[in-house]
Amino acid sequence: MVHIENQPLVIIDKGQLVEKAEQMSKEGFRLVAITCAAKDNFELTYSFDKEYKLNNIRVVLPKENPIVPSITKPYFAAFTYENELQDLFGIKVTDLALDFKGTFYKLSVKTPFAPQTQGPVK
Amino acid sequence: MAQMSIAKVILRSVLSRPATRLYPVEKRAFYKNTRGSISIDIAKCIFCSICQKKCPTDAIVVKKDEKSWEINRLRCITCNACVDACPKKCLNMENMYSPGVVKKGADDKFTQEAKPKEENPQ
Amino acid sequence: MATRTIIPFGPQHPVLPEPIHLDLVLEDERVVEAIPSIGFIHRGLEKLVEKKDFFEMTYVAERICGICSFIHGQSYCQAIEGVMKVDVPDRALYLRTIWGEMSRIHSHLLWLGLFADAFGFESLFMHSWRVREKLLDIIEETTGGRVIFGSCKIGGVRRDIDALGLKRVETELRTIEKQSFELTEVFKKDGSVKRRTVDVGMLSKEEAVSLGAVGPMLRASGVSSDSRKLGYAAYANLNWEPVVETAGDCYARCMVRCRELYQSFDLIYQAIAKIPEGPFDVKVTGNPTGEYFARVEQPRGEVIYYVKGNGSKNLERFRVRTPTFANVPPLVKTLAGCELADVPVIVLTIDPCISCTER
């Protein structure tokens, strides 16, 4: 029998993101990953883990002018993921503790994963 | 003594024969399962092009009107997908790697000759 | 007043297996801070889902990295099986465990060699890789390829190992275990190894958790967390506990990996004894709809595979978060305050696999 986990997902507004992250940090969760899916809008999924149970929080951003607050205050390790969001997707993250301003990834094409550059690769 | 804990390993490697092989004087024997290169029994092929559809790198080109089957050795990743998919089982995975080439574009092409009408011996 | 100089480390450096760039800010031989920068080997593999259907993405997922390639393929198959709710037969789960642990042994032996090279002990590097060659021969005999196994597929595995093959694997592994025991004794006891690694790159328990460290970095600081305890593949039926050390320096991380080497040998012997008979794959029809996070333990730590399907043959989103990416903040933290000569040793203790980090 293969093992399939139950992974609860909660969708919240981006204004509640920072206080929800601080509450998770007080309860002892560790940050696992920040994932972004970009098609008609941006879906950011923040994954937290405690004692082998995964909890997901989702924030949905509109396609034009996507801005999201940073969670580096409770979780300093988020700076790598948020710099990647800026470099690959073009999402603007405010209050970053360590902001590379687009130079974290050395790329030849700016924001390759953003929706306007989507479509089958040649 | 803490400094000489590697003495046993060094002594053994000094007194025994070297671990390397004197290639090209002594060549290595490949195993039966080694994925080396693809070969075809062209007499059995029916040119259905299933291998061309399954190939992930588009290395196989099948032309039904010319009765030819061509493979680009530099693109083939020896993944075995074509061998598994062939309905007539005329593709085989040899355990010798294909020889090196000095310029691109030298693909291996196999053509089926027209068979004379004959009775199959019993 | 000490002057500050900036020294670029990488992307080409004799000690690095793959290109990463660090700008080291120095004050008279002591590193004050390190600024990482990646992107030299970014191939955009996540965007290939728009072109290749989800069956062919197994080949792409295996080729993300050359050192941990089988476990990447296994994680991708587990993610798709989680979305489509496929029931994989037991024999396939045990075979995946055996190949996964062989992959872990080969990765740790490779790391031991590179680590010895980082502080200049080249003959130990050569001996570690000589032992690893025998293991690659077994892998080639059972799967067909030395580094890219090509044996995992959605719904099971692609080829079987019969009982005779398993017996041969066990006898060969006992010889390899004896030889690698002699090597790890050198790492444990040799005076020059200890002088370069003890009390270098300290990471305390609270820092490791808050900075998001994974894998041996986390376990060497006293936190017992191993994703194999989730119970995927056959790990729920085998008898083992995560390997933990408490010192938090480079020597502790080296010891965690050496002890995990013995644990992998033991897990393979247990799996070979318990493997059931039966089919080794199951036919999969239909297209994936929905999303799932698959979490698997690679040799370097915990890897997350996120797949999202919308009912067509091409996936909508495929995302890999590899352990080296999560270990970059602890690297930046441990580099602050160390000597310049310790920088290669600390960069190698996180086991950098940059081609995984940037896919």
Image (cartoon, rainbow, N blue to C red):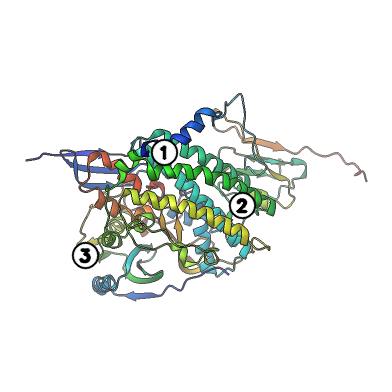
A57 and C230: which is toward the camera: C230
The amino acid pointed to by label 2 is: Lys
Q: Residue at x 49, y 44 (%)?
A: C180
Question: Does mark 3 fall on the same chain as mark 2?
Answer: no
**Residue indicated by mark 1:** B5
* Residue where numbered disc 2 is placed: B54
Q: Position of residue C51 (x, y in %)?
A: 50, 54
Q: Is residue A67 left or right of residue B50?
A: left
The N terminus of chain C lies in quadrant: top left
Outermost residue toward the top in this view:
B25
Q: Residue furthest left?
A: C1
Residue A94 seen in the current view: yes
Q: Is residue C241 above or below residue C255?
A: below
- Residue that label 3 marks: A73
Amino acid carrying label 1: it is: Ser
Q: At 82% from the left edge and 39% from the top edge, which residue is drawn?
A: B115
